[in-house]
Amino acid sequence: MIKRREFLKYVGLGGAGVLGSGWLLEKVLSDSDVQSLNAVSLTKPAVESWVTSICQQCPGGCGIKVRLVDRRPVKIDGSPLYPINRGTLCPAGHSGLQVLYNPDRLTSPLRRVGTRGENKWEPISWDEALLLVQKKLSELREKHLSHELVFMDGDSRGLMSTLIRRFMEAYGSPNHLRTNLNAHSAVSLMQGGSGEIAYDLSNANYVLSFGFDFLEAEGSPIWLARMYGQLRQRANRTRARIVQVDTRYSITAAKADKWVPVNPGTEGAFALGIAYVIVQEELYDKEFIAKNTFGFNDWTDTKGVKHAGFTTLVMREYYPEAVSRITGVPIEDIIRVARGFGQERPSIALSGKGATSYSNGFWNEAAIHALNALVGNVGKPGGVVPQPEPPFTPQADIIHDEISKKGLSRRKISEAGLYTNEFPAQVLFLYHINPVFEFSNTKKIIDVIQKIPFIVSFSSFVDETSEYADVILPDHTYLEKWQDDTEVPGIGFPHVGIRKPVVDPLHNTRHTGDVLIRLAHALGGTVSTSFGHSDFLSLMKHSFRKMYESGSGSVVSEEFEESMMIYLEKRGWKVERAASFDEFWGQLVEKGGWVAAPRYPTSLPDMFQTSSGKFEFYLHSLKEKSQNKDDQLLLPHYEPPEFIGFENDYPLYFKIYDTNTLFGGTGANQEMLLEMVGHRFYQRWDSWVEINPETAADLGINHDELVSIESSSGRIEARAKLFPGAMPDVISMPVGLGHTSYGRFAKNRGVNPNEIIAEKFDSVSKTAVKFSTRVRVHKV
Amino acid sequence: MARWGMVVDLDMCTGCGACIAACKEENNVAYVSPEEAEKGRAISWMQMVNFVEGEFPNVHIKYMPRPCMHCDNPPCIKVCPVHATFKDEEGIVGQIYERCIGCRYCMSACPYTVKYFNWFEPEWTESTIASMNPDVSLRKKGVVEKCTFCHHRLQKARDKARAKGMEVVDGDYTTACADTCPTQAISFGDLDDPNSNTARLSKSKRAFRMLEDLGTEPKVFYLSEGEKNV
């Protein structure tokens, strides 16, 4: 028998130890709370179950297991079966149920009744909404203007990406704009192929990261954090060294062994300075260089013209004194880091947003990646490895009619085109993207969006851009839908995650994949016949058949079983498999994914798909593209970054960064993440700006004071945090707050730094870059 | 009988805050309004404490996740006039909400500031109310709350063990924070069990405890970061 005293202890410590202790909850809840809780039926004994799925709070692709009580989700944890995160999860992952149960979710399709941006809507039926969209699409095709359908896509990969691409091609528009591409453009020219690479961090000994904030929000954060744990305290290995080259003392810099602050945009110069020391002291991998690279030494082409090699350029231009002048890094640091990198192999150089978000980002990345070739660390354990794809059954060919052929022959618009009047869209589709909030110089974006006659949003919430939409066709949240999750950036083994409905859709929403298939069928003709599947789920089943038939890999399992599978597979064995596809599918859905052994290339030429078949210091393919005659401009070199705003008027560099809570802004509708947003600065629910204490003293700014930050594009106000990890001439701000829409929690909290970022594009790859703005700061 | 304790390896901790989020979700910790949060009244049983040292460019920040230390000699229980806070046989320091009169003596006695007061009736929104953990009771206005080492999980583990006629041992249960830590920096277990990994780590050369000289005998250990040079 439980004594009163003991019983109270249990009550105090957290419930009565059995599920369904509803009366306890009722005691402290108001009547209305109790009413909403009655839906959970806490007054009866409850049944607990767990369902696996894949998170979508960020692009990290972690496996989750959701705890359900009476079939109602109450908690999200990491799935121990899933190889990316092995039972662990980040703050945003835990916050997922606040997306599912969010009070500001759209409950049905909406048609705009107010003016654009006014946020006035009327609910309409799905049939009505789809008819509206279908009519517009038919009209456009009849006018032979199919290329003026623009699909902006911020978060699609795997089959969803294939489906959107298929829809656009069958319809006849080249304008599928993806902003979530992880392709390293310089790497793809140096190695050939798509440029999708992974870093085998767990086997590295010396990690030299150039602005790759891998402990915050780049790549797949949990995977990288797990690799970090292994670099630090792994069994039977020495503790690896980590050097972080960055313009801000990020969490990664804090956890690194050394932080090297460099002048903004000079990361590439620093890399070339390291290359100088490595060449000078002959620390490079001579065998790898001789066998597998092109353009290291001077060479003569078929016409007998002499070309300068990488060494010649580096030895001439990037001696430590010169590099120190450019980067602001002391000479002894350059030499020390270079020796460490050259000697403590396997060493690996990583490039991230911090190095590539400048106008010279392409060349920074090229210089950084050249270091990996110098130490011969490409295509082997502890180095840069290819990012493999899972085997999917191909779909039937797309059938083109005359209209789509004509549409597809038009030139694809670029991100830069958004800021000019050339943006040709008649109809705009928005999928997991919010340009009015996320893109540089948001005011200009609003002007462009305003001019588009018809806008369709697939958002589950009314966000800033959806406010300008004509129709909103709300998608399910990730906890309510079927989707595959592959191509997670930086994971060096083939994998497929199965995102499945953890709960039946709470509202009258629809899977965007299903909506697109239905639209295609409604459009008729070749657009319709290009879609053989009735819905997204059957497309998934069709595509996974090859995974089953190929016999490679296995359904995800506990860590030990999986390492056994990988051990066997690497030695040519086939692992025990399901007897039929249906059985395979059943296992796949239950466990939540499929994984296979990493496939390092058996020979390096497989990895280097360049015209020379080797790793190219000299970028042949760029020569063809740009007709550039100057050798020096085709080798990794330092190109001074361009900034917007004159130094006299705007003396400080402006850096923005993603946090592992808000991920660029999508997390801002969740209380959990808003409360945690600045937990490292003890700041909750609000924005802040990091300023060096001495700079602040010069400007007369105190800690926590409100300051104004002004660029040539606009002005915002935020609270100053005096932070010794800020460089004297760089101020930094987190992105994600400052919504003017996106629900009650997000609205009017903090400020959006994208408002004052001037638009700027990479000089080679033409992608938008965001660290090119200068600002001035003063007390309000 | 087990003596539950925790070891946090600061060399592996990345300050990501997953422990904070997991704890809030697991334990039905209420969200206060942004205005109250601004006054430092946000409740989070697990906090990420940081220490900034040095000046540019030789700056160093240390991050330390800080739950309740579950002291073997807890100062908080000595000052409680109503015996609302207590230490149980397995070393877990608990708080009986129904007894708590909200005097906050324990909060001022705690050198680690890990006890939190409910200044207002918690406001649950549709986002949070629906995902309540039915295993954990909610707290009302005027009571102090704190980390329980996920005691409700222990109760479940004990039920399971007893059904087999056994005692709860190391590995039978873990806290939500330790469960979710991406780098596995947090380990939780029986400090008295010689086979426990947690107990082994707590005796590591790198191990230390917060404000050890106060004699509170915390059962949360930290492992210091590795040597820092390049």
Image: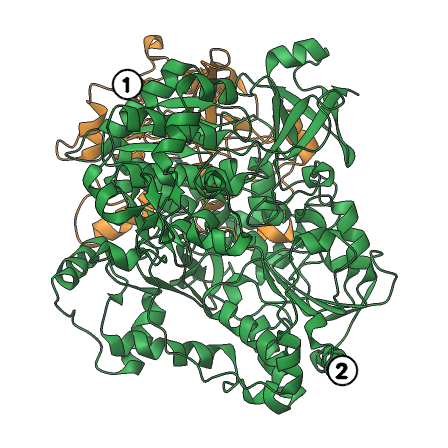
The disc label shown at residue B227, or none: 1
Residue marked by disc 2 = A135
Determine whether A645 is above or below A400 in the image. Answer: above
Q: Work out whether residue B149 or residue A642 is closer to the camera in this orientation and state it.
A: A642
Q: Position of residue A26 (x, y in %)?
A: 57, 50
The picture quadrant where one finds residue B60 is top left
Q: Colour of chain B?
A: orange
Look at the picture and state if A686 lies above or below A449.
Answer: above
* Residue A91 spot, x, y in % from top left: 48, 43
Query: What chain does mark 2 sit on?
Result: A
Of residues A325 and A124, which is closer to you in this image?
A325
In the depicted view, which residue is nearer to us: A689 or A318? A318
| Residue occupying the point 16% across, 63% down | A569
Tell me if residue A467 comes above or below residue B212 in the rendering.
below
Q: Is residue A459 left or right of residue B11?
A: right
Say above or below: A361 vs A511.
above
Three-letter amino acid code at the position of disc 1 = Glu
How crowded is the residue under tag 2: few (<14 C-alpha within 10 Å), some, or many (20+)?
some
Viewer can see residue B87: no
The percent position of residue A338, horizontal first and vertical second, equals 32, 25
Q: Is residue A299 left or right of residue A247?
A: left
Residue shown at the point (59%, 71%) measured from the top left: A512
> Mark 1 near mark 2, Cβ–Cβ under 8 Å?
no
Q: Residue A82 appears at what percent x and percent y?
A: 32, 57
